[in-house]
Amino acid sequence: MKTLIGKLRRLPNSHVKSRAGILSIFAIISAQSPDDVIDELIQGDKSFCDVNSLYTHIWRHLAPKPFIGEQFWKILREKICVGEIFSDCTTLYNGRRPSKIKIVELDFLGALCAALEVVPRLSADVIKENLAKYLSLLIGRWAMLIDASFPLTQFGSSKASTTTPSIIMAELLKVIFQKIHLLSASKKARILPNTNTEDRITTQIVCKGLKSVINAIALDDMKFLCDLTKHQMDNLDDLSSWEADLATISILSDTMVILSQSLKSSNDQNEADTLLNIMKKLSSICECSTTMTTVKFIAINGLGNLFLPPEIRCLVDVDDVFKSLLELFLSILRGSQEDLILSEAFHGITKVVRNSVKPPMSSFRKPIFQMATTFFQKANPATRKSAVEVITVLSVNFRDDEDKEDFVEELHRNLFDVLICLADNDKDVKHAAQDVLLSIAPLMVDDCAQLIIKNAKSDNLHTGEFTAEFCCRFVKNYSIEQSIAMITTAKDRLSSSSGSVRGQATTIIGALTKDFPESSKLAPLAAELLPIFVKMLHDECPDARARAGEVLSFIYKF
């Protein structure tokens, strides 16, 4: 082989017959030993897709040959999809210190570049054979190549300024899509993100690029998307790399949304089954304790975006899916310590309820409410905000009057926590608490509801004045026991490490006790509060000190 390549290199292009004779010998050898020919060509080619190179000329000549091109593609496909991608080497980065970087293997790169020459010269039927299986692997490998570098050969160093390994892989994806007439997907593959077009490749950018490709595949051929999805789920069991897993889960999440929209009109059982299988796979990933945070986040986000229209009830048990999702999110909230996951789990509950038509909420209102309140004082503001927001969707689709009364009772028990969130130092948390009050206003007595509707929509709500007025109306319209319960809860928060919480708790106690209807029932509790407020006159928080002094001006009467 090396002798033939050497002779071909030395022959000028004008010697047409001699060159054709050598290429014919190549074809004979390729038909007998395609693996040996491919290995020899890959190892000899270091030009990285140079359209004018000798090796490119050989690939282009051999690929259209009957049987040879098909065998070449099968062998190259295996090398690209399951072969070793990276060299394990240490190199100097910016000339300062040794650093591990991802260097692409020469043989892998050679196979990739060879495939770019072979695929366009094959029939669509040859490319379509087991395509869903191999395309799922190719997409994962594209994700692995995003931040990879070329080997620093005399060719690679000059090529690296205009292309990257991921660009070459994206080009292969584009060519494959073109060959099987997925033209929309081909256009999107061409503009997948890479380090030449993006200053910094983030997870969000990668997922956005993959989403555009998957949406395009759905537009071109929904059946093929379902087949691709099945192989994507199989790939997750192999745990090839976190980049590939991230790409796969991103695709599954987007596909789930696409299928739920398609089912409105298609009523296709295959699509419905694929949708449920994706949901089960993503759920198992979320439940696994060893799943990486970013991967789990994307899976939770995908499940939260799921929309099951009423039209598909003949294909899917919508209520059962809804219940399993809420149980999953609650399980995540009980077991996770990471703010990113906690926040997204709350978002998931909020989105799933909002996306559902008449969701069966009865058995979930209380546990969700109780779970949310445990995170109202979480250090991370994003987690606090998402925990507060979830309350806004709990007052929907009451089964009956008893169901509604149970929720109102739970609401009154936890109303203090919502009022505390109005004084949060984070504006987003404060606005979320205002949204909660607006959502529960129809469940409050008219006097309190009117105050909420009039004031809670404001972007510049004066927290202290609103809270004081609300509590004054509360104590006049609700039972003494409910007011005492709120005062008792507020008393426990006076020792909070947060000055804003201490100040808001003091405001609530002051407003509830100022016009308390039966002083004898409040007297024991007032006696406990008196020394606490005296001590708070020296509180480091000015607002808490001022409000403590105000409460002392009338609480001593009890």
Image (cartoon, grey):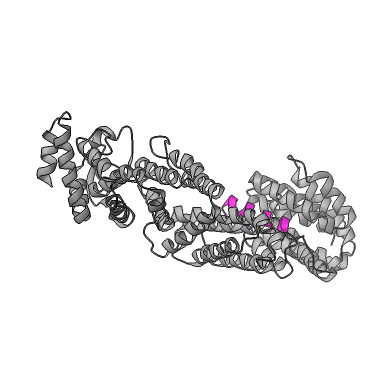
Of all residues, the one furthest to the front in this rendering is 17
Instruction: Please identify the quarter of the rendering in which residue 154 is found.
Output: top left
- Residue 10, position as x, y percentages in the image: 11, 34
- Residue 368, position as x, y percentages in the image: 67, 64
Please tell me whether residue 115 is drawn above or below residue 244 in the rendered image: above
Q: Is residue 39 visible?
A: no
Q: In the image, is residue 376 part of the stretch drawn in magenta? A: yes
Predominant SS of the magenta segment: helix
Q: Residue at x 79, y 56 (%)?
A: 440
Q: In the image, is residue 15 part of the stretch drawn in magenta? A: no
Of residues 163 and 25, the one drawn nearer to the viewer in this rendering: 25
Of all residues, the one furthest to the top in this rendering is 14
Q: Is residue 313 visible?
A: yes
401 relative position to 105: left or right: right
- Residue 106, position as x, y percentages in the image: 23, 46
375 relative position to 282: left or right: right
- Residue 210, position as x, y percentages in the image: 48, 47
Instruction: Please identify the quarter of the rendering in which residue 21 is found.
Output: top left
Which region shows up in magenta? 375-393
